[in-house]
Amino acid sequence: MTSELRLLSEHACFGGLQCFFEHDAESTGTPMRFGVYLPPQAAKGPCPVVFYLAGLTCTEETFAIKAGAQREAARLGLILVSPDTSPRGTGLEGADAAWDFGHGAGFYLDATVAPWASHFRMERYITQELHALVTTCLPVLPGAVGLMGHSMGGHGALTLALRHPGQYRSVSALAPIVAPSQVPWGRKAFAGYLGPDEAAWAAHDACALIAAGGRLPPLLVDQGLADKFLAEQLQPERLETVCREVGQDLTLRRHSAYDHGYYFVASFIAEHLQHHARLLAPGKA
Ligand SMILES: N[C@@H](CCC(=O)N[C@@H](CSC=O)C(=O)NCC(=O)O)C(=O)O
């Protein structure tokens, strides 16, 4: 069953439409907002869809406003979906206390520890509820679904695709957190949402999942070398090593001078969309 969609706004954009919707999400028990870009091709027939998962402190608007993805999505005929990064207005104590935990920092997993488990169920939301809503309510080409993300959202893209094999035919990430169990952002989030038993954390850690046999479609990752979070939080060399060891197809590109923000995302978004369009083209299943 799909909940009622409320259109918040729509804007003509490169011959298509950038829309924002809200609905009452069962997964989180809260209203959830998401952005949708419909390319001009979607008015004539079904198109592939790419979900974009944003990073810490972002909302459903950040990607649509800052990444400049719509021009290339219009050229390629890709629908883009940009969910919010957590439930909002949960009323949980501490949910607004920090920028890297709670509201705006859902880490794309289902919390198992009170009080977070009552609302912070972003894995179920993205992979089931929003997935079903998008594939039934929008003109999506059956099975042509890609997943990408930035930073915390890159972690989300990698882990959700690894944990739901076959659901996403194309995957990519920009400056992702690749080994959250090993770095401060991830350790804080996992301790809070999953509890202190680190054995439970590996199931949400991209490098650990790949080491344990998880596989992804050919993976594209970009990383800026002037990124202030590179050494402490991102550590792409861990992903490079594990992919080499197990034979996972990975294209990891390092770019001097680029930082962590949306100037970096905007610089490489077109190539990510081209990667998704290639893998999602009819006949590529
Ligand atoms: N407030 C923080 C910076 C937060 C930040 O940089 N968020 C990134 C994602 S970080 C990992 O998930 C982001 O995408 N921000 C949105 C933007 O518009 O740049 C600090 O004080 O460092």
Image: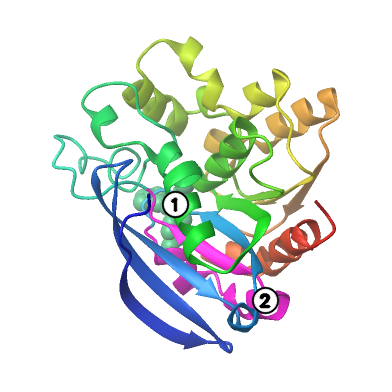
Q: Secondary structure at mark 2?
A: helix
On whether residue 230 falls in the magenta region, the answer is: no
- Residue 108 visible in the snapshot: no
**Labels 2, 1: front one:** 1
Residue at point 18%, 49% (across, down) = 89
Residue 104 pos. (x, y %): 33, 48
- Residue named by callout 1: 130
Q: Nearer the viewer, residue 252 or 37?
A: 37
Q: Position of residue 168 (x, y in %)?
A: 66, 46
Residue 37 appears in the rendering: yes
Left or right: 218, with 210 as reference point:
right
Question: Label 2 is placed on what type of residue?
Answer: Glu
**For the magenta stretch, what is the residue range?**
59-85
Q: Which mark is residue 72?
A: 2
- Label 1 environment density (alpha carbons within 10 Å; few <14, some 14–19, many ≥20): many
Q: Secondary structure at mark 1?
A: helix
Quarter of image, res 77: bottom right
Real-space CA distance between mark 2 and mark 1, rounded to the nearest whole angstrom: 23 Å
Instruction: Name which of mark 2 and mark 1 comes first in the sequence.
Output: 2
Q: Nearer the viewer, residue 240 or 4?
A: 4
Q: Position of residue 103 (x, y in %)?
A: 28, 45
Looking at the rendered structure, the kind of residue marked 1 is Leu
Q: Quadrant of residue 176?
A: top right
Query: Does the CB distance between marks 2 and 1 fall below 8 Å?
Result: no
Outermost residue toward the front in this view:
1
* Horizontal side, residue 241 vs residue 137: left or right: right
Percent x, y for residue 107? 43, 38
